[in-house]
Amino acid sequence: MIDTGLEDRVVLITGGNHGIGAATARAFAVQGARVFITYLRLSPQDYGIDPEEVRRARSPGLPLYHATQTRSADELVLEVRKGGGRVESWETDLADAATIPALFDRAEEMLGPVSVLVNNAAYCETPPDTIFSTSEGSIDKHFAVNTRGVVLLMAELVRRHEARGGRWGRVINVSTDAAQNFASQISYGASKAATEAFTRSVATEVGPLGITVNSVAPGPVQTGYITRESEVELLPSIPLRRIGEPRDIADAIVFLALEQARWITGQVIKVSGGHAI
């Protein structure tokens, strides 16, 4: 039997109320880790989506995706606890830098010192964000969560790790396999590309502290937003000929936290079925 080294480790997962974040919470709980989830419920109106259309959504597409973003983490917390896992959650806006120390305080108070950080939360505007339509506000919103928030979360983890004399830590940042070229979502793609650069630099700096830092870059994953028509169009571009599932990404994230991944750091690993090779 393989000892994964995750039993009773405290894992902080941002954006954990749906999709990849929720699947990751389940996957870590199965390994015996203590899981702390952050989330932020977003209004469909913020994205120009009719709330009534969201309420009626049953088939994959943007309305259904935004419906998942309006949920709290309560249902997931109950599910994990019924399975014997330890999990807590807190709603907070990571665009507000002042919440980050409070987030770690709360996680430590409820579960213990955080040794695994999964930066999964992300901001992405659903109308196309192109050079013809982008704005100062759009750019700032993307970078506030997807880059600045990620870096400050890493910095807080490292500060606390040093203060307690820690010798083991893991950071996994969730990017996208389109980070280097994301026409139609230029601010989202650029913010993720910046985070990949931070991943490599931070890995170099914190390696002597026993912390590994890596990024997982998902391809097309069905988190509710890909319509059936889009799935058919995407399949020829995916060598494994299927759309990804949240658990595909969650399994890769958990792998990078395992003891067996102890000599992997500073890497960006595409988990995409071969999409965007």
Image: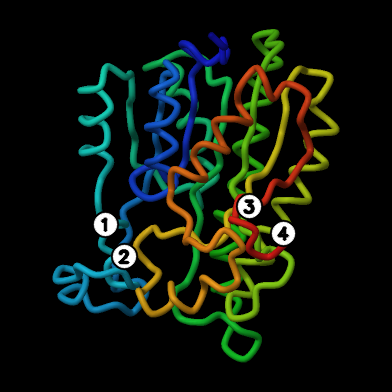
- Which comes before the other along the chain, label 1 or label 4? 1
Question: Which element type, helix, strand or loop, lies under badge 2?
Answer: helix
Q: How far apart are marks 1 and 2 (CA)?
A: 7 Å
Q: How far apart are marks 3 and 2 (CA)?
A: 22 Å
Residue type beneath disc 2 = His
User: Callout 4: few (<14), some (14-19), or many (20+) C-alpha neighbours within 10 Å?
Assistant: many
Residue type beneath disc 4 = Ala
- Location of residue 238 with respect to 99 vertically, above or below: below
User: Callout 2: few (<14), some (14-19), or many (20+) C-alpha neighbours within 10 Å?
Assistant: many
Instruction: Measuring from the top left, give residue 172's x and y in whole percent.
Output: 62, 37
Question: Which element type, helix, strand or loop, lies under badge 4?
Answer: helix
What number is the disc on residue 70?
Answer: 1
Q: Which of marks 3 and 2 is in front?
A: 3
Q: Mark 2 points at which residue?
A: 66
Q: In which quarter of the image is residue 58?
A: bottom left
- Location of residue 228 with respect to 195 vertically, above or below: below
- Dot 1 and dot 2 residues touching (CB under 8 Å): yes
Q: Mark 4 points at which residue?
A: 193
Residue type beneath disc 1 = Thr
Instruction: Measuring from the top left, give residue 53's x and y in whole percent.
Output: 19, 76
Question: Which element type, helix, strand or loop, lies under badge 3?
Answer: strand
Q: Distance between the residues labelled 3 and 4?
A: 10 Å
User: Callout 3: few (<14), some (14-19), or many (20+) C-alpha neighbours within 10 Å?
Assistant: many
Q: How far apart are marks 4 and 2 (CA)?
A: 24 Å
Residue at x 40% of width, y 33% of height: 25
User: Callout 1: few (<14), some (14-19), or many (20+) C-alpha neighbours within 10 Å?
Assistant: some
Q: Nearer the viewer, mark 1 or mark 3?
A: 3
